[in-house]
Image: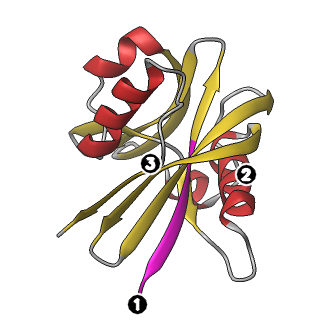
Amino acid sequence: MKIIRACAVIVHEDKILVFRRKINSDEYYVFPGGKQETGETLEEAVVREAMEETSLAVKAEKLLWKLIVGEIENNFFLCSYISGEPKLGNANEAEQATESNQYEPMWKCFAEFPSLAFKPTEVRNWFIEDSKNNFENHLREHTRI
């Protein structure tokens, strides 16, 4: 069964919002996001997921990238910041957070991004390349088998 996800690429004042994940000794960064709910557009899903996971109000501006991995379709939207401070929202992540399973939304400077252990690698590379021209590129799509 195909799972469709919407992920937020939130840019504000030359900073990017990332979600730090630490599972046991594995620490990495991702963009916030989650599953599209029944009856919801992808734009509605990304706005909802950003609020649930980071407590930030955002507006979906543009679909940047689509990465399909097996049965999971990940849609990454450039989002403009409206308001809020990054903190873990009231979603499942808050309930599942423990010492060995950590979730933390945070701003990072664009200059820091290339050195982050970011997943997935394709999206990390697309962000680095596309941020140089203010995300003016056309939609990037990739399917990983």
Q: What sort of colour scheme is used for the picture?
A: secondary structure
Residue 4 lies in magenta, yes or no?
yes
Q: CA distance from mark 2 to mark 3?
A: 26 Å
Residue 59 image offset from top left, x and y in percent: 77, 42
Is residue 23 something that shows in the picture?
no
Q: Is residue 108 left or right of residue 128?
A: right
Using the image as rendered, state which of residue 127 and residue 91 is in the foreground.
Answer: 127
Q: Secondary structure of the magenta portion, mostly?
A: strand
Instruction: Name the secondary structure under disc 2.
Output: helix
Q: Are marks 1 and 2 in contact (CB under 8 Å)?
A: no
- Marking on residue 98: 3
Q: Give, as a single range, the part of the protein colored magenta.
A: 1-8
Q: Is residue 102 left or right of residue 134?
A: left
| Location of residue 77 with respect to 12 vertically, above or below | below
Q: Quadrant of the N terminus?
A: bottom left
| Location of residue 79 with respect to 101 vertically, above or below | above
- Marking on residue 1: 1
**Which picture quadrant has residue 49?**
bottom right
Residue at 28% over, 36% down: 27
Crowd class of label 3 (few under 14; some 14 to 19; many from 20; radius 10 Å): few
Residue at 38% over, 72% down: 72
Is residue 48 something that shows in the picture?
yes
Read off the residue under disc 2. 47
Crowd class of label 2 (few under 14; some 14 to 19; many from 20; radius 10 Å): many
Amino acid type indicated by mark 1 = Met
